[in-house]
Amino acid sequence: MPIKIPSDLPAYDVLTHEGVMVMDEDQASRQDIRPLRIGLLNLMPKKIQTENQFARLIGATPLQIELSLIRMTEHQARNTAADHMESFYRSFAEVYETDEKFDGLIITGAPIEHLDFADVTYWDEMRSVFDWTQSHVHSTFGVCWGGMAMINHFHGVQKHILDAKAFGCFRHDNMDPASPYLRGFSDDMVVPVSRWTEMRKAEIDAAPGLQTLLHSSDVGPCLVEDAPHRALYVFNHFEYDSDTLKQEYDRDIAAGTPINVPGNYYPGNDPSQAPRNRWRSHAHLLYGNWISQIYQTTPYDITAIGT
């Protein structure tokens, strides 16, 4: 079944062209089924690109999804048109005041990993978001910085600055094949990585209630389940498009910023070659499994979430 998004949201045409099932409000109203309400708290500068990436993955599941776009209240988007933000986004303050509940919430990464959590301008509101999820969201998915921030908030696990950027496609091991979130996963798989910080498995393992599901001997933990808080934390980027790492590499080269060629990404490690996507199938599996788990466990009466 399709994802329900406004017909004038840019992702509508993008996903339709790609063959992803989408529907507008009129079509959705004719279906006698409660859609899953999924929120996307988008902290990335390129809002539209990020919308497309996550809508593509959750829209490929056989369920009707109602996607709500959320922004931090005071933080202004600098790389997305104001009319787009005004048309499609609501602030967290608005969502909080209306006492809305969600079956799922994705909290994206943000290009602020060099800052201590407490130095982030919206850290206090971010912590309020994390606490709010415990009473208003059935399952939360923290991505990259979003996952690091959430695991720090609930468990005190620290992020650590790397000597060099972890950048490229790295092999990861399936640590728990029986996990419903890893249903259909291979024993190992390639995942895109782009970050200057890391979380350490020993510190995660020492925190009660956390379980590492995917791990790399090169770049550490990737996917962590936090069952007591009904959350998943993924520190790498299954959602990336085929050329996202290329865009980051080309940007840094153009700016004169020192950067290594993303490892295991270009054929022959040659940036003149077109990169190959070797993570797409596992990206769809992961987000499809997450949506499936939500569908099977969330209350039909959405007001019962968090009670």
Image (cartoon, rainbow, N blue to C red):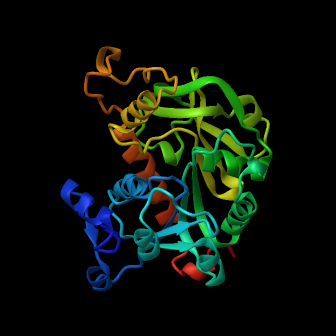
Can residue 172 be spotted in the picture? Answer: no
Q: In the rendered image of this protein, does residue 2 appear above or below residue 86?
A: above
Image coords of residue 113 (percent x, y):
65, 41
Q: Quadrant of residue 187?
A: top left
Q: In the rendered image of this protein, does residue 105 appear above or below residue 251?
A: below
Q: Quadrant of residue 229?
A: bottom right
Can residue 281 be spotted in the picture? Answer: yes
Q: Residue furthest top?
A: 268
**Is residue 135 shown left or right of residue 58?**
right
**Is residue 68 shown left or right of residue 131?**
left
**Is residue 116 shown left or right of residue 82?**
right
Image coords of residue 28 (percent x, y):
31, 80
Residue occupying image coordinates x 42% and y 78%? 34
Camera-nearest residue between 262 and 31: 262
Image coords of residue 259 (percent x, y):
50, 23
Image coords of residue 27 (percent x, y):
26, 80
Which quarter of the figure is the C terminus placed in? bottom right
Camera-nearest residue between 244 and 57: 244
Residue occupying image coordinates x 79% and y 36%? 206
Which quarter of the figure is the N terminus placed in? bottom left
Residue occupying image coordinates x 71% and y 57%? 121
Camera-nearest residue between 257 and 278: 257
